[in-house]
Amino acid sequence: MNIADFGDVALHYRVDGPEDGAPVVFANSLGTDFRLWDKVLPLLPAGLRIIRYDKRGHGLSSCPPAPYSMGALVHDVERLLDLLKVRDCVFVGLSIGGMIAQGLAIKRLDLVRALVLSNTGAKIGTKELWETRVAGVRAGGIESLADPVMERWFSKGFRETPELALWRNMLVRQPAEGYIGCSQAISGTDFYTPTSGLRLPVLGIAGSEDGSTPPDLVKETVDLVPGSKFHLIRKAGHLPCVEAPEEYASVLTQFLRDVGHV
């Protein structure tokens, strides 16, 4: 177990693969920890240096008081990658992780050579939506939102499997303060203009049944960057890396090959 203590926050992270492997960094969604990627990683090419971390207020990372800004979330992973001496990574971000990916590429292009923007947007939801979500968590905890979140996260077929309970448990066991802080960071973020200035390889991945970041939002976001690619995973929701890991890994592997990362 690795902890990077930066004083204001301590990040739990994990590195798999050889020290000299091509780096691929994964950033997970709101309400999950880095186990989000467990099904995909064994299906990727050997020899990659795979870096995962729990963002502040999630998993085993520390939970500073809310609110958080997107700038703080970007700065957290920026410091982690500097600590690990990472340069020219492919950064894979899902949902809020995809917003962090955009922010990092805008700020530190030396760290990022290509982006995978999965189930995300340059702007997600409205200020009012996030204020309502935060008020709900303050009043009734994450448990009060858990069932509607499962409906947005997963396809109907997946929701009928026993595995759903594991993801529901992961969600409700995240610190409420961390969920609130990250919700506030999403609420305050609009990357449409800065993301449109990016010039690097971008792959968008969407799930056809995604109730949080619908395919049109993902495609609209990646289309901001000239030459970007887009892939729709059918019969999957907001977390296609969980519902369709083989297809997800296949698309990701092809992108890594296309950008010369494997």
Image (tube, grey):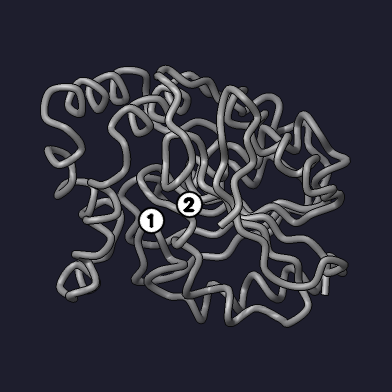
Q: Is residue 118 left or right of residue 60?
A: right
Q: Which mark is residue 218?
A: none
Question: Around disc 2, counting alpha carbons within 10 Å, would you say few (fewer than 14), some (14 to 19), or many (20 or more)?
Answer: many
Quarter of the image that includes the C terminus: bottom right
Dot 1 and dot 2 residues touching (CB under 8 Å): yes
Q: Is residue 65 above or below residue 116?
A: above
Q: Position of residue 76 (x, y in %)?
A: 64, 33
Residue at image x 75%, y 38%? 105
**Residue 3 location (% of width, % of height):** 59, 46
Q: Quadrant of the N terminus?
A: bottom right
Q: Which mark is residue 119?
A: 2
Instruction: Look at 62% across and 28% down and name the residue there.
Output: 192
Mark 1 — residue?
A: 238
Per the model, the C-alpha gap separating discs 1 and 2 is 6 Å
Q: Give percent across and percent down for residue 6.
A: 65, 30
Secondary element at tag 1: loop
Could you tell me the amino acid type at mark 2?
A: Asn
Query: Which quadrant holds residue 175?
Result: top left
Above-or-below relation of 106 to 24: above
Q: What percent of the width, then of the height, locates residue 51?
A: 66, 58
Callout 1: few (<14), some (14-19), or many (20+) C-alpha neighbours within 10 Å? many
Amino acid bearing label 1: His
Residue placed most toward the observer, 111 or 122: 111
Q: Residue at x 84, y 38 (%)?
A: 109
